[in-house]
Amino acid sequence: MVYAGNFKQQNLTIGVSGRLDKSNLVMWDPQTNSLWAQLTGEAVHGPLKGRSLELKSALFLPLSAWLKRQPKSRVLDISAVRNKGWYFQGRHFQDGQYTYHSRRGGSQVDKLGLAVRSATKQLLVSVQRLHKEKLIVRDFAGTKLLFLWLENDRTALVYKAPQDSEFKLEGKVIAAKDGTSWDALLGKKIMAKGKDLELYPYIPTFMKAWKRFYPESTVLH
């Protein structure tokens, strides 16, 4: 997930607090000494308690898939960052689930999902369901959303969609009934007709973790 690095025109340096909330990372900023829940983006302690960081649109996909389409991209080098084996990766998206070792002993399995939220609603879509259907169209908080699974790119994503059309996924192309089509990964229109699709801010998440924070979410298994 990607959050805006400022709050009400104040730049924040977000770091790791070393704490957990419902088994999820808690972030910290030295400017206000506030603690932030990673999954919700909400401050849970400090002067900004109850305020939220703005969730930004971003793609979550293997770097190789992106560079095939955008070879001149600037890439942030994180080779010096200590890699942790529990980070879920493209292969876990491919499986739609993640197996990990519990502190209580034995292996545990958690399914992966794509989550979206508004001020009053949350929707969680299972990646395994996306594997089967490839494209799911859903009205959410007054916006028509397209949830996609792109097999070749091993990624799932969410777009805002025009309200007055029907859609289908044809390989790497999203096709509308009115003849408009888009590159499924980049959202760019292929023909002059229509506008580019806009990403809707979404969070790739462990489904159990999401439901601990948002138990009233609508869930598509």
Image (tube, grey):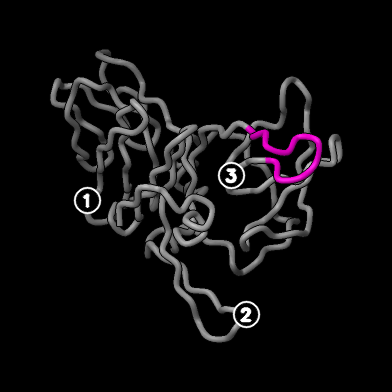
Query: How busy is the neighbourhood of tag 2: few (under 14 within 10 Å), some, or many (20 plus)?
Result: few
Q: In the displayed structure, does residue 197 sit left or right of residue 119?
A: left
Whole-angstrom CA distance, mark 1 to mark 3, is: 28 Å
| Mark linked to residue 103 | 2
Which residue is more in the foreground, 98 or 188?
98
Query: Mark 1 near mark 2, Cβ–Cβ under 8 Å?
Result: no
Whole-angstrom CA distance, mark 1 to mark 2, is: 35 Å
Q: Residue at image x 32%, y 41%? A: 147
Between disc 1 and disc 2, the foreground one is: 2
State which quadrant residue 135 falls in.
top left
Residue 75 pos. (x, y %): 63, 40
| Mark linked to residue 133 | 1
Q: Residue at image x 43%, y 31%? A: 199
Give the amino acid at mark 2: Arg
Residue 19 pos. (x, y %): 75, 59
Q: In the displayed structure, does residue 93 sit left or right of residue 221?
A: right
State which quadrant residue 7 falls in.
top right
Give the amino acid at mark 3: Thr
| Mark linked to residue 41 | none
Element type at marker 3?
loop
Which residue is more in the foreground, 55 or 140?
140
| Mark linked to residue 40 | 3
State which quadrant residue 170 falls in.
top left
